[in-house]
Amino acid sequence: METINWKELGFGYMKTDYNVRCYYRDGKWGELEISSSETINLHMGATALHYGQESFEGLKAFMGKDGRIRIFRMRENALRMQHSCDGIMMEKLPVEIFEEAVLKAVRLNKSFVPPHDSGASLYIRPLLIGSGAEIGVKPAHEYLFIVFVMPVGPYFKEGFKPTDLVIYRHFDRAAPHGTGKYKVGGNYAASMVSGQEAKHGGFSAVLYLDSKEKKYIDECGPANFFAIRGNSYITPDSESILPSITNKSLMVLAGELGLTVEKRKVPYEELATFDEVGACGTAAVISPIKRIFDADENREFVYGTEPGIWSTRLYNKLRAIQYGDEPDKYGWNAIVE
Ligand code: PLP
Ligand code: COI
């Protein structure tokens, strides 16, 4: 293995030693298979290729000071993938298969788990695709589940340094009764043109408004949105956003730190009232936001150029639990034996 400079890692694909696969054929899931190949052999008529029968997940493993590897809230990801299966009519993957495959993939690639003090982690990418051929628009009869992993650094290259978001009313990511609440590839395809425009404008991501009325805050392309005002942690309740496991965890930690948690519709106008704003997710962790630019109204909302006090406390607390520096009193970590 080439030497990896753990501290310089960004968020990108890297080949690791093994991946774990499981096939659904003839009405049943098979045994887990270990592979060292980076490619798959796929029927050209696979529903994943034509009709977007595809769901993925993202979770992370962390190296503790004690040399033990911890995987954060794996069951939540397994359950969310099942929810995505219901949303796009894929064969539901049993939670036990998801968990066993994730544990196996991490164990087999132990040497790629970044050291405790690097600030990096092992990103785990489970993927489920309709692999059976259909030419009419209907669900496949065969599915392939794969788990692969790679060491990663921060998703936004600035890491925990505040970045800028942009609002565009001429782009939508997901419709209110569409697939925004599922983790399916089509949502990400739908966010690429706007995401690219944002990057070219020097923004780290798009902050989407609700597609129907353009009155409420939804989320960012790859992360949920939260804000702090006074003693409140405020985060959108919306039918078209992904239920983030990081956000769910931050709501618990915010309560523990003495904040009141408000999960509700967040009107656009409230952007002018927040003390701190952040994007949160597995890849993004907490990414503080210093400015939101509304490109249609030519209006800006400015927050601190340094991470706010509550965002910093929440970030430190979440990281301490994930890296095993604080007791895991909610039982969020699975230890990889
Ligand atoms: N929202 C979207 C659209 C995402 O892709 C992600 C990433 O998974 C999130 C939110 C954050 O979710 P989680 O905290 O479960 O990673
Ligand atoms: C994650 O945070 O795990 C995600 O899936 C976001 C992503 C689009 C990289």
Image (spheres, helix red, strand yellow):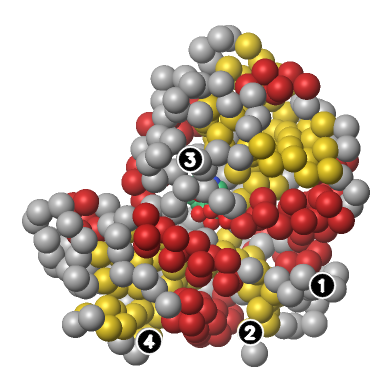
Q: How far apart are marks 1 and 4 (CA)?
A: 32 Å
Residue 108 position in % (x across, y down): 51, 85
Residue 211 position in % (x across, y down): 45, 27
Residue 323 position in % (x across, y down): 75, 69
Q: In which quarter of the image is residue 48?
A: bottom left
Hey, what amino acid is under mark 3? Answer: Ser
Q: Residue 336 carries which label?
A: 2
- SS of the residue at dot 2? strand
Local packing at callout 3 (Cα closer than 10 Å; few below 14, some 14-19, many 20+) is many
Mark positioned earlier in the residue sequence (2 or 3): 3
Dot 3 and dot 4 residues touching (CB under 8 Å): no
Mark positioned earlier in the residue sequence (3 or 4): 4
Q: Quadrant of residue 330?
A: bottom right
Hey, what amino acid is under mark 2? Answer: Val
- SS of the residue at dot 4? loop
Hey, what amino acid is under mark 1? Answer: Lys
Residue 200 position in % (x across, y down): 48, 27
**Which residue in the rendered view is the most extreme toward the left?**
135
Q: How far apart are marks 3 and 1 (CA)?
A: 31 Å
Local packing at callout 2 (Cα closer than 10 Å; few below 14, some 14-19, many 20+) is some
Mark positioned earlier in the residue sequence (1 or 4): 4
Residue 193 in the image: above or below residue 88: above
Local packing at callout 4 (Cα closer than 10 Å; few below 14, some 14-19, many 20+) is some
Q: How far apart are marks 2 and 3 (CA)?
A: 34 Å
Mark positioned earlier in the residue sequence (3 or 1): 3
Hey, what amino acid is under mark 4? Answer: Leu
> In the shown orientation, is residue 162 left or right of residue 166?
right
Q: Distance between the residues labelled 2 and 1?
A: 18 Å
Residue tagged by mark 3?
A: 240
Residue sitting at x 89%, y 52%: 257
- SS of the residue at dot 3? loop
